[in-house]
Image (cartoon, rainbow, N blue to C red):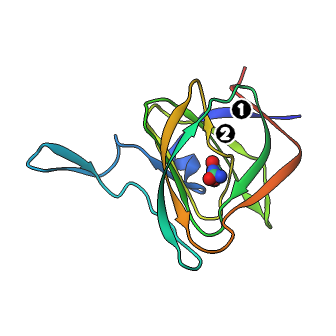
Amino acid sequence: MERINIEPLTEEQFAPFGEVIDLNKAENFEINNGMCTRFNDLATVELGGKDARPLVNVFRGKPYDLPLHLKMVERHPLGSQAFIPMTKRPFLVIVAPDTDGVPGTPLAFLTKPGQGINIGQNVWHGVLTTLGEVSDFVVVDRGGRGENLEEYFFDEGYLVDFAD
Ligand SMILES: NC(=O)N[C@@H](O)C(=O)O
Ligand code: NI
């Protein structure tokens, strides 16, 4: 089975697939008489299709073991999907390029503690992959009419782990 090594998440490498949400780099300013810092406009919410509206959700992810046998990636043709961790725990992000409607070789990234991601509309990705312990994420994605989930099951799949 082909192996995929997990790399540190960088804006550059993730740029073709979406945005990295990092409060250390985000636009921010003081509000409420200096009692609050607003980290502003962290990601672009993409909403396509009929009656589209943003959904604000919490996903409580159970931890996966490594090595991970990646059997499937999915995409959301009608909208983006942002994952913002509610705890400062790294998680695994898997994305893949599209080649004529079929995912190419996936890439695997490990976030820094507290970093989130916004996966672009119609971008192939692995489902939320939590590591270590059950973790909550704020997830902002698209609601409305139409089918917003396309799944692709690999013949053999990939073994995802840290390099030896
Ligand atoms: N199914 C669902 O809402 N979650 C997936 O889209 C995912 O990317 O985790
Ligand atoms: Ni998804």
Dot placed on the residue nearer the N-terminal end, 1 or 2: 1
The image's mark for residue 108 is 2
- In the displayed structure, 147 sits above or below 152; it is below
Could you say where residue 40 lies in the image, as x and y percent from the top left? 30, 55
In whole angstroms, how far apart are the C-alphas of marks 1 and 2? 7 Å
Q: Residue at x 43, y 37 (%)?
A: 86
Residue lying at the far right of the rendered structure: 155
Q: Residue at x 70, y 62 (%)?
A: 149
Q: Secondary structure at mark 1?
A: strand
Q: Residue at x 55, y 38 (%)?
A: 60
Nearer the observer, 145 or 140: 145
Could you say where residue 48 lies in the image, as x and y percent from the top left? 56, 74
Amino acid type, callout 1: Asn
The answer to whether 120 appears left or right of 32 in the picture is: right
Could you say where residue 119 lies in the image, as x and y percent from the top left? 57, 55
The image's mark for residue 5 is 1
Q: Quadrant of the N terminus?
A: top right
The answer to whether 5 appears left or right of 69 in the picture is: left
| Pointer 1 with pointer 2, Cβ within 8 A | yes
Nearer the observer, 1 or 35: 35
Q: Secondary structure at mark 2?
A: strand
Nearer the observer, 7 or 150: 150
Q: Quadrant of residue 161?
A: top right
